[in-house]
Amino acid sequence: MLVDEARERIKYLQEYIRKIESYRPATMQEEAVYLYVQLESVTKVVQELNKKGYRIGNRKLTTVDVSNIIRGKPKDEMHEMAKLMFMKNRKRGSRYW
């Protein structure tokens, strides 16, 4: 890795840390986005949200619910970051035969 590339990665990571530390989720949707940026796993986000008691109606959340939240129109910088990560992970996980 070149020194310039390392500097760019450091800047990116410092900005990532700043965003994570300053973000205060106020809704279940914001909490889902915030957790996804940290965990990068829809399944893990669903588990955490269900542990915290979040529900849709009277049922527990599913991976489809969280995926739909993340794929929705970004409402803030954190949501934009989550959506980009989600799309990148989807492409990496899909297989074209």
Image: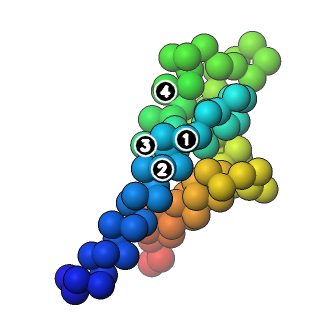
- Residue underneath mark 2: 18
- Residue underneath mark 3: 39
Looking at the rendered structure, the kind of residue marked 4 is Gln
Residue 56 x, y percent position in the rendering: 75, 23
- Residue underneath mark 1: 22
User: Counting residues from the N terminus, which is met first, the one under dot 1 or under dot 3?
Assistant: 1
Which is closer to the viewer, label 4 or label 1? 1
The circle drawn on residue 47 is 4
Which residue occupies the foreground of this view, 67 or 26? Answer: 26
Label 1 to label 3, Cα distance in Å?
A: 17 Å
Q: Relative to 77, is 48 above or below?
A: above
Looking at the rendered structure, the kind of residue marked 1 is Ser
Q: Relative to 77, is 24 above or below?
A: above
- At mark 1, the secondary structure is helix
Label 2 to label 4, Cα distance in Å?
A: 25 Å
Which is closer to the viewer, label 3 or label 2? 2
Q: Is residue 6 visible?
A: yes
Q: Quadrant of the N terminus?
A: bottom left
